[in-house]
Image (tube, rainbow, N blue to C red):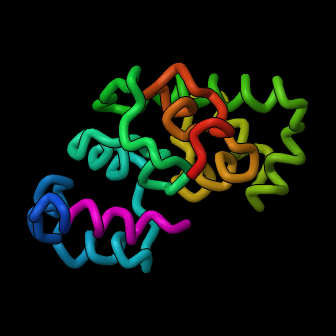
Amino acid sequence: MNYGEILKDIRVYEGLTQKEIGSILGINAKTYGLFENQFKIIPLYHLNTLSNYYDISIDYIFNFTSIKKYHNYTKVKDIDKSLVGDNIKRFRIENKITLTKLANILNTSHSTISAYEHGKTLILTSFLYTICKEYNISADYLLGKIDNPKYLNSTKK
């Protein structure tokens, strides 16, 4: 994943310090610095908060597209685990991807994928990134922040 450099570039462009972003996220500057330098993977709820704060797409933060904000973009305060799970399951079935294949791609178990698909657990940032990169699907779509584009073919850099 290469979101750290983009988060840093956006923060610097906005004239903000790591301490100020940490305050927005309710964490200290050192912890935020670990996310920005990618020594720790940023949790999806923090990534969503930054996406909303900067008014930019997660696809842009992930460097999947040069589009900073989709025309139909919705700020989602709290990510709906059930909606995300439904979107992942729908995507998996539409593309004829078995639970086994997805679990193998993510190096995890069937039960983990099932927990995501049933809305019991929010997908990890790294797993979301991997699915989107592997299948060229929009993270913003899977998270319910947009309804179109679903796939990123037309939005790549």
Q: Quadrant of residue 84?
A: top right
Residue in the image at 46% along x and 66% along y: 41
Task: Examine the rendered structure and indicate whether residue 90 appears above or below residue 140.
Answer: above
Location of residue 92 in the rendering, given as x and y in whole percent from the top left corner: 78, 32
Task: Examine the rendered structure and indicate whether residue 67 appears above or below residue 144.
Answer: below
Task: Examine the rendered structure and indicate whether residue 20 appears above or below residue 30.
Answer: above
Residue in the image at 17% along x and 71% along y: 18
Quick check: is 9 in the magenta stretch?
A: yes
Location of residue 117 in the rendering, given as x and y in whole percent from the top left corner: 66, 31
Q: How many numbered badges does the structure rendering display?
A: 0
- For residue 94, side relative to residue 69 (left or right): right
The overriding secondary structure of the stretch rendered in magenta is helix
- For residue 28, side relative to residue 113 (left or right): left
Q: Quadrant of residue 5?
A: bottom left
Please state which of residues 129 and 14 is positioned toward the viewer in this rendering: 14
Location of residue 53 in the rendering, given as x and y in whole percent from the top left corner: 21, 43
Location of residue 39 in the rendering, given as x and y in whole percent from the top left corner: 43, 79
Image quarter where the N terminus lies is bottom right
Residue in the image at 78% along x and 52% along y: 109
- For residue 140, side relative to residue 112 (left or right): left
Magenta region: 1-11
Please state which of residues 73 and 104 is positioned toward the viewer in this rendering: 73
